Image (tube, rainbow, N blue to C red):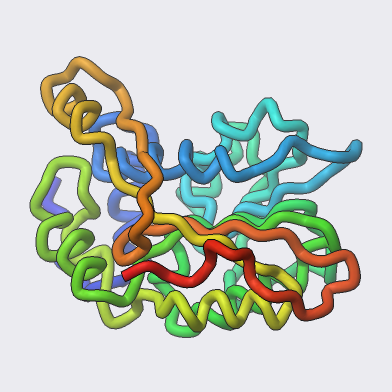
């Protein structure tokens, strides 16, 4: 089937590729690998009825990696086809906009926003909203792409041309994220973020290309200049707190 050619960052591309969400060798293969790395930052639920809010959940790729942690997994997305898939993987689906979350304050024990900050025009508003709905003591987990030449090269120039890389035109490099601003926005809401980079294991990737692996491990790196993760806890009173020692971005 020939897919329509859309403008960069057009969210309709996710609907065009809806049948790829759970294909281990499909267009969204790397999103599964990143979701596994994201889940490693999520602590086990600390109370009965704890809620994990998954912003821009897509087809629910985080679900199998957090299923044993004890949360009620609520996923928010704009795509109806993606939400239908997410429901089938145990996610409670909610249709909504990540910049205007349809939730009350302090309702989530964990908020994750994976691979979405680089797709919105107001990423710091997304952070404000994520912190707003996060309970005191709760955990914020983010991953996104840095606004650097390496972020543009690795995710667009090169990334769109290699197997398992982002589908062509999925990203607009103009929306990639300023790390200092991200840290500062979270800090204003009482969350001190710690940042680390991510890269695929070269050996795993070669084995995946050869058909000998179903997935590729994403490994932490010191440099946050490309794909990176951020994690932090909201202070009990929501007051401003300095970021964790490792949070300043590394070029």
**Image height check: is 60 above or below 103?**
above
Left or right: where 68 falls relative to 49: left
**Image height check: is 209 above or below 221?**
above
Residue 14, how many percent across, how many down? 35, 56
| Image quadrant where one finds the C terminus | bottom left
Q: Quadrant of residue 203?
A: top left
| Image quadrant where one finds the N terminus | top left
- As drawn, the residue found furthest toward the front would be 245
Q: Name the residue at 57% across, 36% down.
A: 63
- Could you say which is closer to the camera, residue 56 or residue 7? 56
Residue 142, how many percent across, how many down? 53, 59
Left or right: where 142 falls relative to 102: left
Residue 25, how many percent across, how many down? 24, 31
**Image height check: is 188 above or below 190?**
below
Q: Name the residue at 90% across, 71% down.
A: 237
**Image height check: is 8 above or below 33?**
below
Q: Name the residue at 45% across, 64% down.
A: 116
Q: Name the residue at 30% across, 71% down.
A: 9
Report if residue 172 is visible in the image.
yes
- Could you say which is closer to the camera, residue 239 or residue 119? 239
Residue 64, how many percent across, how many down? 55, 30
Report if residue 77 is visible in the image.
no
């Amino acid at each position: 089937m020939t897919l329509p050619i859309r403008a960069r960052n057009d969210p309709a591309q996710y609907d065009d590729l809806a049948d790829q969400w759970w294909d281990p060798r499909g267009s969204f293969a790397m999103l599964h690998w990143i979701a596994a790395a994201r889940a490693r930052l999520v602590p086990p639920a600390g109370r009965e009825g704890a809620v994990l809010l998954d912003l821009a959940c897509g087809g629910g790729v985080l679900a199998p990696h957090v299923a044993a942690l004890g949360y009620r997994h609520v996923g928010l997305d704009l795509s109806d086809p993606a939400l239908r898939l997410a429901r089938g993987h145990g996610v409670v689906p909610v249709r909504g906009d990540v910049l205007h979350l349809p939730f009350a304050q302090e309702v989530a024990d964990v908020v994750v926003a994976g691979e979405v900050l680089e797709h919105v025009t107001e990423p710091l508003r997304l952070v404000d909203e994520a912190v707003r709905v996060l309970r005191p003591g709760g955990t914020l987990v983010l991953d996104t792409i840095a606004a650097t030449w390496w972020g543009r090269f690795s995710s667009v120039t090169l990334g769109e041309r290699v197997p398992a890389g982002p589908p062509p035109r999925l990203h607009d490099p103009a929306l990639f994220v300023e790390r200092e601003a991200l840290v500062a926005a979270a800090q204003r809401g009482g969350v001190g973020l710690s940042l680390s980079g991510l890269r695929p294991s070269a050996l795993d990737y070669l084995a995946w290309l050869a058909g000998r692996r179903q997935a590729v491990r994403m490994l932490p790196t010191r440099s946050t200049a490309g794909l990176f993760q951020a994690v932090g806890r909201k202070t009990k009173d929501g007051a401003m707190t300095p970021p964790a020692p490792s949070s300043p971005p590394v070029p």
